Amino acid sequence: MNFDLVIKDGTIATASDVVRADVGITDGRIVAVAERLTGGKRTLDAGGRLVLPGGIDAHCHLDQPQAPGAASKGAAMADGFRTGSISAAFGGTTTIVPFCVQHRGKSVTAAVDDYHRRASGQTVIDYAFHLIISDPTPATLGQELPALIRRGHTSLKVYMTYEALHLSDHQLLDVFATARRERAIVLIHAENHEILTWLAERLESEGRTAPKEHAASRPLPVEREATHRAVTLAEIIGVPLVVVHISGGDPLEEVRRARARGLTIIAETCPQYLLLTADDLDMPDMEGAKVMCSPPPRDVAAQAALWRGIQDGTVDIFNSDHAPYRFDSEGKLLAGPSASFRRVANGVPGLETRLPILFSEGVVKGRIDLSRFVALTATNNAKIYGLHPRKGTIAVGADADLAIWNPEKLVTIRNADLHHNVNYTPFEGLEVQGWPETVLSRGDVIVEERMLKASPGRGRFLEQKTSSAFPPESRSWT
Ligand code: DUC
Ligand code: ZN
Ligand code: ZN
């Protein structure tokens, strides 16, 4: 058999198996996984290194228009699709799913068209869009959403907090009912807006405005209550739900309880909740703003609870929640160098460091095995967001999106070495073992020897199919 490319002698890991084999690639797709493949126009010697599916980062924010009252608090995003996708590629990620936001009073279709323009010609890897619904009018739910879902946007995010984004329970029920009817998967940001606003006002009135008060204004019960309520609303409608960026044990427990009642609830966590704590917000000179995200990082007990959830299968997906605000007057310090925590953009960057962090802290430290790593970072995202089996696995017929990892490589994370456009990383100085040295997208080598080998614009928009969280409407075996 003739191949465009054969990757020789790799240790191939999927969400189910780890095998020693070669991978044959033709026309950008995997056409063979077998021992001793010959007939490649080109060969790439993996030399026993790990060959994993390229990562899918299904929670990242890129080039969202500036909007007061949102998580950004009006700040500008420093990464668009170009730098965001390049940074992702250097970290072994080959598909990104950022968010296209509908602002209140505006059409979601117009937002999608605008977001396509922002992405077009920019990316080095493939991409899809989640929709954010902030104004679920009858026109949005009755006409726009069904049409957009048919155009391949089968996932929507809704918020229970942020002045400009949060929906009432009544509105959430409306969105969930539409999602059930149209078979779209809903992601939810679960924090109780009333409680955290009340707490923030109290803290401010006492003059407590430093970054560390961000965590004080959003304690774990704020997230636990909202998670419980979100799950309850999903139960009333009978729709699957993804609870994103879970930060500790209590909300995870809500997921377990819901699953025990038979609900399909998917749980996501992110690197910042495994590695940071609220103490990291308590730094001089506003430095704590660098790690200010929502929900906030908690404590070591929360970290341990999340690792248990990762190990026992409660956590399904691991994404970055990359939110690219620079530590300067256009980003985190937009409201001034000593602004109240309420006026600081929420979010941390992490597209490039997501996979190496979980590989090092999870696989190398013996907390999870390779297949679980692949499931959490690629395969489960592909299935849940309607991209499987084209993305997220190594199988005949799948796109040849692959990362060849050196599991021994020691790297100290330094912002100077990263490729995003943010001027810090919350993981500065962290030592990790294991790094994706060669990255392929649809059979093209896009990163090799720490060099970018691809031009922006080669990445393609991906239409999402129905999420695997929905039972199939009909079965076909061919
Ligand atoms: N929280 C969000 O809700 N969005 C972006 C990042 C963050 O911290
Ligand atoms: Zn969120
Ligand atoms: Zn987010």
Image: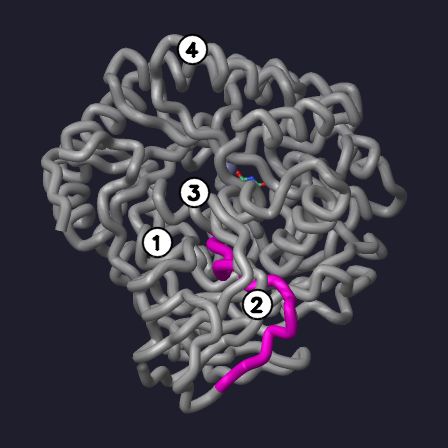
Name the quadrant containing residue 182: top left
Q: Residue at x 43, y 82 (%)?
A: 38
Q: Earlier in the sequence, mark 3 or mark 2?
A: 2
Mark 1: secondary structure = loop
Q: Which of marks 1 and 3 is nearer the N terminus?
A: 1
Mark 4: secondary structure = helix
Left or right, 86 with reference to 338 = left
Badge 3 vs badge 4, beta-carbon distance below 8 Å: no
Nearer the observer, 290 or 318: 318
Q: Position of residue 398 (x, y in %)?
A: 33, 62
Q: Which of marks 1 and 4 is nearer the N terminus?
A: 1
Q: Does the residue labelled 3 lie within 8 Å of ligand 3?
A: no
Q: Where is mark 3, residue-wise?
A: 380
Badge 3 vs badge 2, beta-carbon distance below 8 Å: no
Q: Point out the frontmost of discs 1 and 4.
A: 4
Badge 2 vs badge 1, beta-carbon distance below 8 Å: no
As drawn, the label of residue 129 is 1
